[in-house]
Image: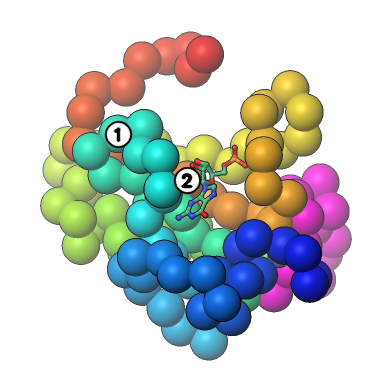
Amino acid sequence: MDDCLFCKIVAKEIPARVVREDETVLAFEDIRPQAPVHILIIPKEHFASLDDAGEDKEAILGRLLLAAAAVAREKGLARTGYRVVINTGPDSGQEVFHTHVHLLGGRKMRWPPG
Ligand code: 5GP
Ligand code: ZN
């Protein structure tokens, strides 16, 4: 996707503070962190949202969650806990339409979320 912000981060056309990368997944610090640790984990392949994910996305969706857990362990969040969020569609507040997982931690979270 030519005009997709996160595709440009994957292509290294826009800089990001990358914390993890493999052949299918990229993880980088959110530019407006909402917690002491706020990492975005994205598929290198573009698809707009969870609502656009068909059966063919089963493997990559699993990889995104496992990458989030691995980054959480690396950041020392496994014991204290953390939150994983996938905003999907207008009511969620999704702003970037390239599927991404938010990993948030390092502070006490409230429930329900706002
Ligand atoms: P959404 O609201 O779509 O679930 O989350 C999009 C996230 O992307 C927001 O938390 C926002 O701060 C982050 N973001 C937007 N633009 C950039 C950028 O250029 N670089 C980085 N690292 N994060 C961004
Ligand atoms: Zn994209």
Q: Position of residue 47 (x, y in %)?
A: 77, 62
Q: Is residue 74 left or right of residue 60?
A: left
Residue for point 53% across, 87% down:
23
**Which residue is labeled 1 in the image?**
35
Q: Is residue 89 above or below residue 99?
A: above
Q: Residues within 10 Å of mark 2 (few under 14, many from 20)?
A: many
Would you say the residues marked 2 and 1 are in contact, meaning their CB atoms lie under 8 Å apart? no
> From mark 2 to mark 1, how far is it between C-alphas?
11 Å
Q: Is residue 95 left or right of residue 104?
A: right
**Which residue is labeled 2 in the image?**
102
Q: Secondary structure at mark 2?
A: strand
Q: Is residue 98 left or right of residue 110?
A: right
CB of mark 2 near ligand 1 (< 8 Å): yes
Q: Which residues are magenta?
A: 45-57
Amino acid type of disc 2? His
Amino acid type of disc 1? Ala
